[in-house]
Amino acid sequence: MASNNNSGSNRVEVPEAKEALNRFKMEVANELGVPLKQGYNGDLTSRQNGSVGGEMVRRMIRNQEQAMSGQSGQQQ
């Protein structure tokens, strides 16, 4: 088995999706009122950053569940 030198968990598994994920992150941050900007965001709190990441995960899980159940596009 080949060893991967990139031990960080914050890597994009599909490089072609990186820009779409960045747009998604900015959209979620905007909707939550988190002043996320391109580049350095060290002035944000852990709570602010966590709320963006948490909401992204919730939405991705919801979308995948809908796709798996054949209900694509329907929101609750």
Image (cartoon, rainbow, N blue to C red):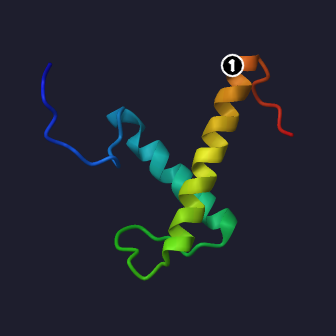
Q: Count residues near mark 1 (Cα–Cα under 10 Å), then give few for <14, some for 14-19, many for 20+.
A: few
Q: Is residue 69 left or right of residue 23?
A: right
Q: Quadrant of residue 74?
A: top right
Q: Quadrant of residue 62?
A: top right
Q: Position of residue 67 (x, y in %)?
A: 69, 22
Q: Nearer the viewer, residue 41 or 2?
A: 2
Q: Nearer the viewer, residue 71 or 39?
A: 71
Q: Nearer the viewer, residue 74 or 47?
A: 47
Query: Residue lying farthest bottom?
Result: 43
| Local secondary structure at mark 1 | helix
For the point 64% across and 29% down, the residue is 64
Q: Is residue 45 above or below residue 50?
A: below
For the point 75% across and 25% down, the residue is 72
For the point 68% across and 63% down, the residue is 31
Q: Position of residue 22 (x, y in %)?
A: 46, 52
Q: Is residue 47 above or below residue 66?
A: below
Q: Position of residue 21 (x, y in %)?
A: 47, 46
Q: Quadrant of residue 14?
A: top left
Where is the C terminus found, in terms of image quarters? top right
Identified by mark 1, the residue type is Met
For the point 60% across and 64% down, the residue is 51
Q: How many marks?
A: 1
Q: Position of residue 56 (x, y in %)?
A: 59, 50
Q: Is residue 17 left or right of residue 75?
A: left
Q: Is residue 2 left or right of residue 40?
A: left
Where is the N terminus found, in terms of image quarters? top left
Query: Residue lying farthest front?
Result: 1
Q: Is residue 76 left or right of residue 57?
A: right
Q: Which residue is mark 1?
A: 68
